[in-house]
Image (cartoon, helix red, strand yellow):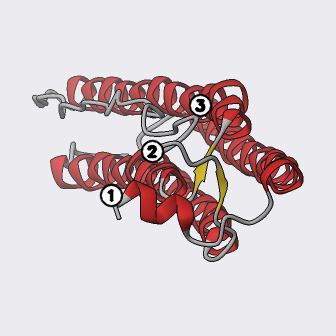
Amino acid sequence: MTGFDPEIVSSSIKGVISAYNSLSDALITQMQTSFVNAMATKWACKNAQNFFTTSFKPSVDSLITQSNTLFTSVVSAMNSSAIAWATATESTYSPISFETNNTLMDIEGIQESINGVRGIDLEGTPEVVNTLKTIAGNAESALESAVGAVQSCGFIGGDQAANLIASLNTIKSNVNSAVSEITSTVKTAIDQTVTAYGNTKGQIEQAFNGE
């Protein structure tokens, strides 16, 4: 590589940061809004609380923490390589800043009962569960974008780039495994709820809305 090109550096690192923002949106915003908050209006009992406390939250929180640690390392490595490139060409470089979203899953909305009503409204619940697959797909796409940004940047050493890419692919695998396990576990918990309470057919949502 010849003269230092700040545009290449900026484009590459911003590509990684953009990918991180998309991943964060999937694992935090979409998971909270489209799954947790949606289920809170349809499912209220000990089975629901146990699932979210012992299975869902630890798994998703771990993914968020892993992702934050990894992307911090990726951006740091890219900034360090850019500094080395600038130094070698007697240029200057100001590292690009990066902040993670450290928000974890909020499951306080999952209740044992809502206005005395316990059980699950099956209508619409499968659709909510299916959002897990969509969220996993969005997270996978974000991680693939990050891999592409690292592969194409050109100013990180081959071994270091390979290690970062391997770590990103590991997170992608972990996301898929976690969502698969969560999907299986939530379906079992839902079946147990139906066995205990039957299909409350809208009563949970009505109680949630104060009707």
| Side (left or right) of 22 relative to 192 | left
Residue 164 % position (x, y): 59, 34
Task: Please tell me how crowded label 1 is: few (under 14), some (14-19), or many (20+) other residues with Cα within 10 Å.
Answer: few
Q: What residue type is disc 3 on?
A: Lys
Kindly state the secondary structure of the residue where label 1 is placed: loop
Which residue is at a point 58% across and 29% down the rendered structure image? 160
Which residue is at a point 56% across and 59% down the rendered structure image? 42
Q: What residue type is disc 1 on?
A: Gly
Kindly state the secondary structure of the residue where label 2 is placed: loop
Q: Is residue 57 above or below residue 155?
A: above
- Residue 115's tag is 2
C-alpha separation, residue under disc 1 versus residue under disc 3? 27 Å
Residue 15 % position (x, y): 34, 55
Contact between marks 1 and 2 (CB within 8 A): the answer is: yes
Q: Name the residue under label 1.
A: 210
C-alpha separation, residue under disc 1 versus residue under disc 2? 8 Å
Say which of marks 3 and 2 sits in front.
2
Residue 30 % position (x, y): 43, 57
Which residue is at a point 67% across and 64% down the rendered structure image? 200
Q: Mark 3 points at which residue?
A: 57
